[in-house]
Image (tube, grey):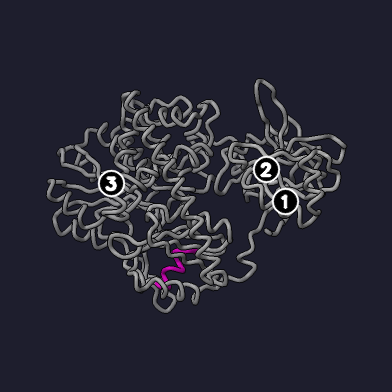
Amino acid sequence: MAKWFVTAKRADFTKIGETFGISPVLARIIRNRDIIEEEEIRKYLQGTIEDMYDPGLLKDMDRTVEILLDKISRRKPIRIIGDYDADGICSTFILHKGLLQAGAAADTAIPHRMKDGYGLNEHLVEDAFQSGIDTIITCDNGIAAEPQIRLAKEKGMTVIVTDHHEVPYEETDGERKYILPPADAVIDPKQEGDAYPYKGICGAVVAYKVMEALYRRLELTQKEKPLLEELLEMAAFATVCDVMELLDENRVIVKFGLSHMKNTSNQGLRALMEVNGIDKGKLSAYHIGFVMGPCLNATGRLDTAVRALQLLEEEERAEAVRIASDLKQLNDSRKEMTDIYVKQAVRSVEENGLMQDRVLVIYLPDCHESLAGIIAGRIREKYYKPVFVLTRGEEGVKGSGRSIEAYHMYEEMTRVRHLFTKYGGHKMAAGLSLEEKDVEDFRREINEVCTLTESDMEERIHIDVPMPVSHVSMEFVKELELLEPFGNGNPKPVFAHKDLTFLSARILGKNGNAIRFTVLDDCRNKWEMMAFGDPEPMNDYMKNKFGQEAVERLYLGKSQDIRLSVTYYPSINTYQGNTKLQLVMQQYQ
């Protein structure tokens, strides 16, 4: 079971509440996000796109704009080379549409996951050269493509890198030497000497910043405002899909994007909402991250991401709906395949002696390589350990990793980099290629260099406010909306109630993956509380703690025996015209 901790960061919550017209409870939650200074709080609660940072603060931005102005004026062919995930697709869309509107001769290429692998490769460079391309612009990739960019330069091409990933480095005697590609301009907020105030932006935001800077120089910002707003919507979409922290500038971008997406002019986004049955008036970061985004990602996983780019660029509604429907079907197939291989991964961990490893390396040779990252994430959630899932590719073995908070995945991989033919990533996620003969050596060595302690691998639940459910009201739930959008870095607040009495339970849903409880608060009021997910683990926990008969009485609605401490989030449920408060259980013990 996870360990629970009450977050007790100090501040004058009453004063903050009075200054910003919010409750002391909300002030406490904001302080728990390490938002302390008055200007930070203002930006968190009231920030607009006017609070976004100047694109000129990115290193090499002036140089990039000068190159683009020159290429546009001479109609030199430009090729944008993106990536096959949602961030790469959105980045490609932003640069392509923005450059075309600025008068550039531009086209696009997106690597095929199976044939090309991640990012820029020699084949893509050769193809661009044979096609008479003058300038390559990478987006959401390129920072680790030093050999490929050197090849492009040898062939006389201009290269601009726009990326957000970690800069590769070599480490000797504790000193790091960072390796930048030999491009004509490199825009990446993580490179040395970059003055951009917020480093946590995704590739699509970097691409948007390039277009913003270009349009300023062309004095088109006001004339092309609707276009720039559409491009910023895409940057917001990618920010959520790439699981960037929804803080600082990212929060401003996503709030703007969500508000404008509800009435978007982009036919592809409208179609994605339609085929997934999303009420655009209630669009949230959840819908982007867990419903719409996976449809884009599924094309890069099981087909070609070119289809997803076609969807975003489609201007005819009927065709957009047709493509969106195809993408949804692909994603449904992806979910079925994922479930099969997650079960295989669990068996591998529990039957092949991997449980004692602090870093799980799971080899699923027959699994579609595009599913490795999703499976790694699911296994990480189950065991709360860093996880690498490896699959057999066309050339050697490929894999994806997902990490836990205490483990910097990219840095740890760098310590065993001699085993890889290719690798890259950041703290929480990474990708790699290696030869099949090195799989077991990788498992052994990545564990040998691991310094995680037992406490590092204990999941910690940070409670924002220990608050009896009797304190919940409609007004309070509506006030919580000020904290949205929720996501990485800005999770839904966690409230806790100790020793809550459970009166009845009923399993719901066609797959039986939800339980509706009736609970009794400290003021003897009854509440509806929902728990989502497989009910068996919770039922087993209650049977062990209270006995089989007590659980049976609970499901018969005759229980007074079961009392559990829970963490929860209050919400408003509207069904058949009736609106009422509802509690959503997050954890129990």
SS of the residue under disc 1: strand
Query: For the point 22% across and 33% down, which residue is it?
Result: 103
| Type of amino acid under label 1 | Tyr
Which residues, given as a range, are shown in magenta?
408-416
Residue 356 position within the rendered picture, expressed as x and y whole percent measured from the top left:
57, 72
Compute the Cα span from label 1 to label 3.
Answer: 45 Å
Task: Check disc 1 and report the residue beneath it.
Answer: 588
Query: For the point 55% across and 66% down, which residue is it?
Result: 350
Q: From the image, state whether disc 2 or disc 3 is nearer to you.
A: 2
Point out the image quarter for the C terminus. bottom right
| Type of amino acid under label 3 | Ile
Q: Residue furthest bottom?
A: 173
Q: Residues within 10 Å of mark 1 (few under 14, many from 20)?
A: some
Disc nearer the start of the sequence (1/3): 3
Left or right of 551, for residue 67: left
Query: For the point 43% across and 65% down, which residue is it?
Result: 363
Task: Check disc 2 and report the residue beneath it.
Answer: 531
Point out the image quarter for the N terminus. bottom right
Residue 219 position within the rendered picture, expressed as x and y whole percent measured from the top left:
31, 31
Residue 378 position within the rendered picture, expressed as x and y whole percent measured from the top left:
52, 54
Left or right of 546, for residue 237: left
Residue 13 position within the rendered picture, expressed as x and y whole percent measured from the top left:
74, 44
Query: Considering only vertical position in the picture, is 105 above or below 494?
Result: above
Q: Is residue 128 magenta?
A: no
Residue 428 visible within the image: no
Task: Check disc 3 and report the residue beneath it.
Answer: 110
Disc nearer the start of the sequence (2/3): 3
Query: Considering only vertical position in the picture, is 9 above or below 519?
Result: below
Compute the Cα span from label 2 to label 3.
Answer: 41 Å
Count of numbered circles in the view? 3
SS of the residue under disc 2: strand
Q: Nearer the viewer, residue 8 or 287?
A: 287
